[in-house]
Image: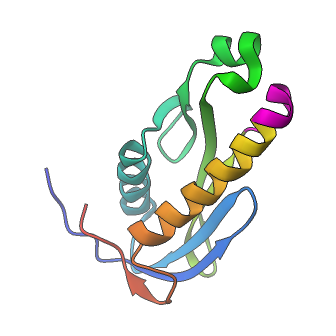
């Protein structure tokens, strides 16, 4: 089912671990739907918690623990809250890369950059305020 997202991005703050995004003119449910659709689009599924307060991931947890950096694993912590500036979406990597030695650390840093670039593109670029694509 397609719905129209009427909210707007008022602030986009990327970091080394992910990004925080503030939205105006929308509800937490609206932002949760946008976040879930973005995460599914980049291959991440809800592993724990709820859509608005959860952990999304891909890859094998057990394989990563056993084989380290040679096994691809991604994990992002998602949090949606309401504040003075509207609805805030926080998406931060839940992995350090240290468990996979130097290979895992390099891969994790690279994945984080790709994740933030994908989120920026999905939200319509880095200019604010800007529209979010219709899910």
Q: Which residues are magenta?
A: 95-103
68 lies above or below 97: above
Task: Say whether residue 21 is left or right of residue 45.
Answer: right
Query: Which of the 4 image quarters holds residue 131?
Result: bottom left
The secondary structure making up most of the magenta span is: helix
Residue at position x 56%, y 32% in the image:
49
Query: Which of the 4 image quarters holds residue 104?
Result: top right
Query: Which of the 4 image quarters holds residue 122?
Result: bottom left
Q: Residue furthest left?
A: 1
Q: Is residue 98 magenta?
A: yes
In this view, the residue in front, 58 or 90, is 58
> Dividing the image into 4 quarters, which one contains the C terminus?
bottom left
63 lies above or below 106: above
Residue at position x 73%, y 56% in the image:
17
Q: Position of residue 119 (x, y in %)?
A: 49, 63
Q: Position of residue 11 (x, y in %)?
A: 58, 82
Task: Say whether residue 109 is left or right of residue 123.
Answer: right
Residue at position x 55%, y 33% in the image:
57
* Residue 96 seen in the current view: no
Q: Is residue 100 magenta?
A: yes
The way the protein has been coloured in the rendering is: rainbow
């Amino acid at each position: 089912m397609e719905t129209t997202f009427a909210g707007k991005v008022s602030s986009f703050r990327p970091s080394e671990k992910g990004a925080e995004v503030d939205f105006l003119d929308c509800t937490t449910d609206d932002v949760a739907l946008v976040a879930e659709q973005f995460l599914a689009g980049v291959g991440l599924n809800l592993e724990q918690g709820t859509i608005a307060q959860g952990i999304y991931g891909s890859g094998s947890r057990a394989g990563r623990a056993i084989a380290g950096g040679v096994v691809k694993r991604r994990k992002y912590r998602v949090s949606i809250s309401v504040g003075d500036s509207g609805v805030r979406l926080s998406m931060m990597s839940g992995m350090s890369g240290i468990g996979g030695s130097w290979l895992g650390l390099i891969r994790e840093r690279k994945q984080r950059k790709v994740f933030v670039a994908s989120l920026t593109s999905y939200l319509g670029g880095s200019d604010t305020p800007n529209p979010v694509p219709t899910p």
